[in-house]
Image: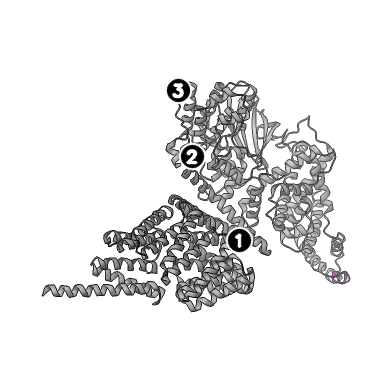
Amino acid sequence: MQSPNAGQVTRLLFDWSKGDKAALDALMPVVYDELRRLAARQVRNERPGHTLQATALIHEAYVRLVDQDLPNFESRAHFYGVASRLMRQILVDHARARAAARRGGGAVKIPLDEAPDISSDSDAVALLALDRALAKLGASDERKCRVIEMRSFGGLSVEETARVLGVSEPTVKRETRLAQEWLRRELELQQ
Amino acid sequence: MSTDRWKRIEDLFAQADELPDDERRAFLDAECGGDADLRRELEALFVETDGDVAPFESVVRAAAVSLASGPEASAVGHRIGPYRITSSIGSGGMAEVYKAVRDDEQFEHDVAIKLIRRGLVSNAMLARFRNERQILASLNHPNIARLLDGGTTDDGLPYFVMEYVPGRPITEYCREKKLTLKNRLHLFRSVCSAVQHAHRNLVVHRDLKPSNVLVTDAGDVKLLDFGIAKLLAPSVSPAAVTLAKTMTEVRMMTPQYASPDQVRGEPVTTATDVYALGLILYELLAGECPHHLKDASYAEVERAICIAPVDRPSAAVARNAPSSTRLRRELKGDLDNIVLMALRKEPERRYQSVEQLAEDVRRYLQGRPVTARPDTIGYRANKFVRRHRAMVVSGVAVFLMLATFAVMTGLQAARTARERDRANEVTRFLVGLFEVSSPSQSRGNEVTARELLDEGALKVEREMAGQPELQAAMMDTIGSVYRSLGLYDKARPLLERALAQRIALLGPDHPDVGDSLHDLGTLYYFSGDYDLSEQNLRQSLAVRTKAYGEHDARVAEVYSDLGELLRTRSRYDEAEPLLRQALDIRRSVFGNEHEQVAYSLHNLGALLEDKGDIDEAEALYREALAMKRHVLGPDHPSVATTLNNLAGLLSDRGDKVQAEQLYREALALRRRIFGAEHPDLAVSINNLGLILRTNGKYEEAEAMFREALAMKRKMLGPTHSSTAVGMQNLGDVLEAQSRFVEAEALYRESLAATLTVFKPDHWRVAAVESALGSCLTKMGRYAEAEKLLVDAHAKLQAALGDDNVRTKDAVDRLARLHEAQARTAGSGRANSR
């Protein structure tokens, strides 16, 4: 079933893909909301321990939010581009909350009755490190940052990523490898 | 790792990646020289293949699992400023709401904190947030939850701190406590009092709905989030309320609580809150919201809120709870009226203030007469117009969306002809909408249709500059609509710019350029700029022929239009091959029996009639008539068109009796099709009038002309070119009856009207001047007459050529003037002797 927002999201996507920055501002909360809603529903409906798949979430959000009659592959690709960025944001927000709860001190106190479990905490730390490294990469080479964002956070294929960025598939593969290497080195330095 | 070194790795990798495996090794050997580290690093890059992102995927997946399996990503336990978050209250599209406690003081007290989501914060929002926080914090009313504080977290997220209200939505409260009608109304008055206070401090809530109106267990009303909606609205310059902005604002609201003003993108005022209060009162009384918009599309929301009438609360109760007869009785009358008055679509027709609404509720409670009235006869008379106006205003949005859709689909799917045709169909539909609807509605509505377009054109100009291709397509569409409304001066700049933009963007041979040239050529044809029209149509023909080949309906269209143009310019010999070519192409594309073929037959007939090949013209008309009757059915409007032309031909050839009969047939057909009023009906009445006049039946002719003129005045307005022709014809039949004074008045009125549409040297202006000159001649006012007739003749000669009937008429009239002058001069001389 389609969300009541389908027509608007489609329109906003179109505007955004045509360079209207304000459209993205309007788009983010809708997609953010939908992704979280879907994530929450997956948790309710699936067996415990079931792996939440970022890619599947984004595909589902896309189907619900975008008017299927209208967009061609181009708009779909753009949507995945936005959704990937949002997915990164959502996961980072979440990780930050968990990591912060553990870190303590500064502006945030640890509530004694809410000690986070260790494993998810180390995941959170890893994700935040990745996020910081990505941000640094993005500052000097935005395209590489977007490639990783789409491929890792959005689960986009090489072909889809190429379409969003308007580059060839070999370029995406090459950028992926270089970005990976750059991030690997950066993360080693951080440790 | 140094930037230079990384840069070198990148470069070498990119180069090596292009090479086949066997050459790569040699390349790397040569480039790395003795730098073993560099060599090793580069080799490592080639180990991972196919852009695998596995290492990060596992990190991301782990985080996703954590998100999905843990509680809502939560700030619980964190501190924001001096507040410690204790639990989550809820979450909306823009923000998370938490319960928190301030514990750096001696006494703890609970607060609610609204934390704006990361990623949704713009600088403009932060600036507005700082500016307005003070105003909101100053709202001090027992029924308004105080805004206590606000700021940004260490992470830069804005937050609001509000008085914590342990309560539930007012609707829930009333339901659970089974409050009586009277108590519900008292509670509602407390809500009004809070809103009143805010309005006095120039703060509009904008997002009033039951979930923002809480009632505590003690029965105290508290309004939440005053003014917050405005802080969170996406930033726009005040002058440009964009469609996207409106949609966003409405989207951020719960659609069923949006007011028509908000949906239409009009300024939010205190009347917006009056409307929202009306909705809350409705829900308190009837137990449900009047709009059910859960899965509605934007268009449905717009329709429901801006156009559809609202059910009376008592009717809703009758429907949902048939057994509640007592409640229904209580609601019927005053309470229905109060609610519906607050819910009127037009802000200016609602209660002028929340005070007035609250006062009416008080009057009801005291058993005194209320001020709210049902829709009375007084304004039912205007209701259609008003409703229509609402439709037109919201229509701007709908129009732009439809047009954008059409254009977008056209752009995106230009490769598949079918999709493109669909988009074109929508465009045609839009143009047709205005063509058909504007004249058949009253004049007042034509004006609003025009306003609608003006606004649309402005929006396109202002808001689509970043999308030049779409902008050009929109300008072309809107320009064509202007043209169909006869607003040529408005149409021209749009169509010209669309053309220029398309040539610049797409090159001179693009099919879209062909479309623009055609549209512009058509415009110039209607506005009487025949040279320009011809120029553009010929270019369009060249572009389209190149794009589609000779045997294409779109090419035939230009041949046909160009032929029509040349016919109008009396260049019959040039026009004929073009119209025949159009006919041939259409026959080969559509087959022998097709409406397009019938149109071509008709057009060719019209040309040959003008040219003087009366016999062949008659044969073509009859063939077209038979084909139309067969293909389109006997009652199709187009059948009447050919009947009319055939009648005209017979009339010219002298067969006045048969002509009169065919005109009567055409008129009867049109009366059947169009009912009482339609522009084409007016034409038919007019034509019958003409033949009746020719046949010397002046009185019946006069009656026809008067009917036609009245209809045109009403439908098209007093200055429309067709109205002007109606005036001229009536003048003519009056003149024939020697009622010169009446005739002169009508001619002059006609002239004035014609001049509002056409330039002073247009042949249509000249035709009226010629008629007026002739009338003045008969009245003996020779000097005035001469000036008019000489002028008119010159203009007609220039525009239509010497052979045109109208030019010849003008010559005759001048001759009669000179005869009359000569006679008078002769008798004058005789008298003076």
Task: Tell me how far mark 2 sits from mark 3, CA to CA.
Answer: 26 Å
**Element type at mark 1:** helix
* Dot 1 amino acid type: Asn
| Residue at (33, 75) in percent of width and height | B811
Q: Nearer the viewer, residue B776 or B27?
A: B776
Residue at numbered disc 3:
B368
Q: From which residue to which does the magenta span run? A: B24-28
Circle 2 sits on which residue? B347
| Callout in the foreground (2, 1) | 1
Amino acid type of disc 3? Arg
Q: Position of residue A112 (x, y in %)?
A: 78, 30
Residue B703 position in % (x across, y down): 36, 56
> Where on the picture, by quarter, is residue A121?
top right
Q: Nearer the viewer, residue A60 or B303?
A: B303
Secondary element at tag 2:
helix
Quarter location, residue A102:
top right
Residue under label 1:
B424
Q: Which of the two labelled residues, at mark 2 and mark 3, occupies the earlier sequence position?
A: 2
Q: Chain of mark 2?
A: B
Tell which circle, 2 or 1, labels the residue nearer the N-terminal end.
2
Query: Where is B65 relative to B18, above or below?
Result: above
Determine whether B253 is above or below B506 in the image.
above
The percent coordinates of residue B85 (x first, y second) are 69, 32
B307 relative to A167, above or below = above
Q: Is residue B682 above or below residue B116?
A: below
Q: Which amino acid lies under the numbered mark 2 shown in the image of this protein?
A: Pro
B25 part of magenta stretch: yes
Bin the neighbour count of mark 3 within 10 Å (Cα to Cα): few under 14, some 14-19, many 20 and up.
few
Mark 2 or 3, which is nearer the eye? Answer: 3
**Disc 1 chain ID:** B
Mark 2–mark 1 Cα distance, whole angstroms, equals 37 Å
- Kindly identify the residue that appears in the image at 81 percent across and 69 percent down: B18
